[in-house]
Image (spheres, grey):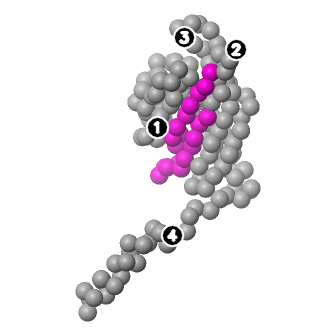
């Protein structure tokens, strides 16, 4: 009898995720609250990059983090940590203008902006338009992916 009941329940167990409700899109008040959280998180990231706070940086970047440079070079989490510890110019702590926040279910937040970034080899500053994606992790916000595109002079 127990065996028959278990076999009858298997299709329901297998369909569990399919029957689950998708995440709900935050309403305006929730979205504004999340944006404030991300602003605070971005300040934490900038401070950690500037002060070369390795433990904080290691916790900030998602394990699967990737950054695409304006040159097309791709960094993973480890490479990004090395860049931060070396004091290389990064969008994470660069002054930013034209910042836009878009909040999605999850919650996930996409932030875009524009920043001047020093090209160390040329010793010349260029404007970059960038995007960063923030996701919720087990212990709070994580920087999941970023990309920077150099703007024409």
Instruction: Specify the segment rendered in magenta.
Output: 131-150
In the picture, residue 11 is in which quadrant?
Answer: bottom left
Q: Quadrant of the N terminus?
A: bottom left
- The mark nearer the N terminus, 2 or 3, is 3
Give the alpha-carbon distance from disc 1 to disc 3, as whole Å: 23 Å
Q: Is residue 51 visible?
A: no
Query: Of 92 and 102, which appears nearest the observer?
Result: 102
Q: Residue at x 44, y 72 (%)?
A: 16
- The span from disc 4 to disc 1 (Cα, nearest Å) is 28 Å
Task: Residue under label 2, please give it.
Answer: 153
**Residue 132: x %, y % from top left:** 59, 36
* Mark found first going from the N terminus, 2 or 4: 4
For the residues marked 2 and 4, what is the alpha-carbon distance in whole angstroms?
A: 50 Å
Query: Which residue in the structure is indicated by mark 3?
Result: 120
- In this view, the residue in front, 78 or 3, is 3
> Tag 4 or tag 3, which sits nearer the N-term?
4
Measured in 3D between alpha carbons, the distance from the residue under mark 3 to the one under mark 4, in whole angstroms, is: 50 Å
The residue singled out by tag 1 in the image is 65
Q: Is residue 107 magenta?
A: no
Q: Residues within 10 Å of mark 3 (few under 14, many from 20)?
A: few
SS under mark 2: loop
Residue 138 is one of the magenta-drawn residues: yes
Q: Residue at x 71, y 34 (%)?
A: 99
Q: Is residue 143 above or below residue 147?
A: below
């Amino acid at each position: 009898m127990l065996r028959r009941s278990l076999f009858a329940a298997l299709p329901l167990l297998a369909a569990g995720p399919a029957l689950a409700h998708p995440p709900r899109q935050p309403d305006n008040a929730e979205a504004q609250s999340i944006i404030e959280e991300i602003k605070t998180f971005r300040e934490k990231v900038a401070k950690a990059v500037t002060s070369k706070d390795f433990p904080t940086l290691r916790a900030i970047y998602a394990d699967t983090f990737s950054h695409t440079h304006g040159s097309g070079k791709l960094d993973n989490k480890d490479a990004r940590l090395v860049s931060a510890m070396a004091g290389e110019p990064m969008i994470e702590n660069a002054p930013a203008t034209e910042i836009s926040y878009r909040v999605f279910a999850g919650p996930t937040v996409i932030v875009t902006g524009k920043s001047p970034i020093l090209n160390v080899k040329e010793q010349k500053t260029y404007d970059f338009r960038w995007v960063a994606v923030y996701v919720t992790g087990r212990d709070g916000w994580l920087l999941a992916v970023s990309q920077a595109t150099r703007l024409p002079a």
